[in-house]
Image (spheres, rainbow, N blue to C red):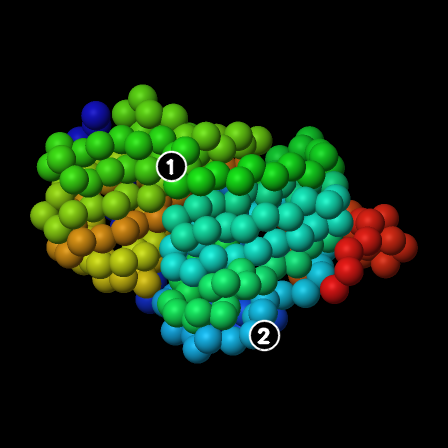
């Protein structure tokens, strides 16, 4: 392992939240933060973080109604609470606590995303991440695909302290591979660290890399303390990230090879040109994304 640290370029507190539908109260770290923008975390395009939100029991299912996507992938990670989804291809399912859904919108899907019924009835803490992973131009119109990834099927790399683990969702850590198939090199981990544990991560220095502290607090590279709900955005000056858990912590780590293609994005579409965005709206309004009941 290289000894050169990837330094923290910015430690970003959660921006003011906004509602997505009535079911997601999210802090948008990127593209909203100027220092990251649309290209700074390429191939990751968007990070919406629903920080812990305590909900009363309800018979009403909070969520987002039918909407389209094209040109990228949505990766939804449930940390507390659970979600249900349905799409125009007839797929449906539940993302339970700890699980991930990796959806390739590709050429286009209509879907709706809701709090799961039993969770809504009981109420409780809801904490979810949605990450948009861009697709290289040659895969933007690929067939839609779902990868439901249960926590138990993630790669499990045990750390030296005997209780901490790097859960590998995609890519690999110390030879342990994650189950998610990706269209470009994408590394996504949950580092579940017990207080006092040390973890060393290593990524290509050209990759764009960041981490979101979901729970607890970690010290990065012996110098930066990142509390929960903060996002650390890394520079390209090294390969290694050293984490030390100040408290019992859960950290979502992401790193990927930049696609380095032009981006044209509007609403639920991420394409390469304005013409393709126009085409996406035309296809959507003319029913080419299929049909889904609200
Ligand atoms: Mn969606």
Q: Please identify the quarter of the rendering in which residue 1 is found.
A: top left
Residue 76: % across, % down: 50, 50
Query: Mark 1 falls on what kind of element?
Result: helix
Residue nearest the observer in this picture, 225 or 262: 225
In this view, which residue lies farthest toward the top?
Answer: 175
Q: Classify 10 Å Cα crowding around label 1: few (below 14), some (14-19), many (20 and above).
A: few
Tell me which label, 1 or 2, sits earlier in the chain.
Answer: 2
Residue nearest the observer in this picture, 190 or 96: 96
In this view, which residue lies farthest toward the right?
Answer: 286
Residue 62: % across, % down: 57, 70
**Left or right: 120, with 125 as reference point:** right
**Left or right: 146, with 283 as reference point:** left
State whether residue 187 is above or below residue 33: above
Could you tell me which residue is drawn at 38 percent across and 26 percent down?
177
State whether residue 153 is above or below residue 216: above
Could you tell me which residue is drawn at 10 percent across and 48 percent down?
196
Quadrant location of the C terminus in the rendered image: bottom right
Q: Is there a contact, CB below 8 Å, between mark 1 and mark 2?
A: no
Residue nearest the observer in this picture, 67 or 45: 67
**Left or right: 69, with 281 as reference point:** left
The residue that disc 1 covers is: 152
The residue that disc 2 covers is: 60
């Amino acid at each position: 392992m290289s000894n050169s640290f990837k330094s923290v370029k910015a430690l970003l507190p959660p921006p003011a939240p906004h509602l997505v539908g009535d079911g997601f109260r999210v802090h948008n770290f990127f593209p909203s933060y100027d220092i990251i923008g649309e290209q700074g975390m390429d191939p990751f395009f968007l990070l919406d973080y629903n920080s812990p939100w305590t909900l009363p029991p309800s018979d009403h299912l909070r969520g987002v109604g039918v909407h389209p996507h094209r040109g990228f992938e949505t990766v939804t990670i449930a940390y507390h609470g659970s979600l249900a989804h349905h799409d125009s291809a007839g797929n449906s399912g539940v993302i339970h606590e700890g699980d991930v859904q990796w959806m390739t919108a590709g050429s286009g899907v209509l879907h709706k995303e809701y709090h799961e019924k039993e969770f809504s009835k009981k109420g409780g803490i809801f904490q979810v991440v949605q990450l948009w992973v861009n697709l290289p131009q040659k895969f933007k119109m690929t067939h839609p695909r779902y990868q439901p990834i249960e926590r138990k099927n993630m790669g499990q790399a045990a750390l030296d302290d005997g209780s901490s683990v790097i859960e590998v969702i995609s890519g690999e850590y110390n030879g342990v591979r994650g189950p998610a198939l990706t269209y470009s090199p994408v590394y996504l981990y949950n580092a579940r660290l017990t207080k006092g544990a040390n973890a060393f991560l290593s990524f290509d220095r050209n990759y764009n890399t960041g981490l979101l502290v979901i729970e607890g607090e970690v010290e990065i590279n012996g110098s930066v303390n990142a509390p929960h709900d903060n996002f650390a955005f890394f520079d390209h000056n090294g390969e290694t990230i050293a984490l030390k858990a100040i408290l019992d912590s859960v950290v979502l780590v992401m790193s990927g090879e930049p696609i380095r293609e032009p981006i044209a994005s509007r609403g639920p579409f991420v394409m390469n040109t304005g013409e393709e965005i126009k085409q996406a709206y035309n296809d959507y309004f003319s029913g080419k994304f299929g049909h889904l009941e609200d």
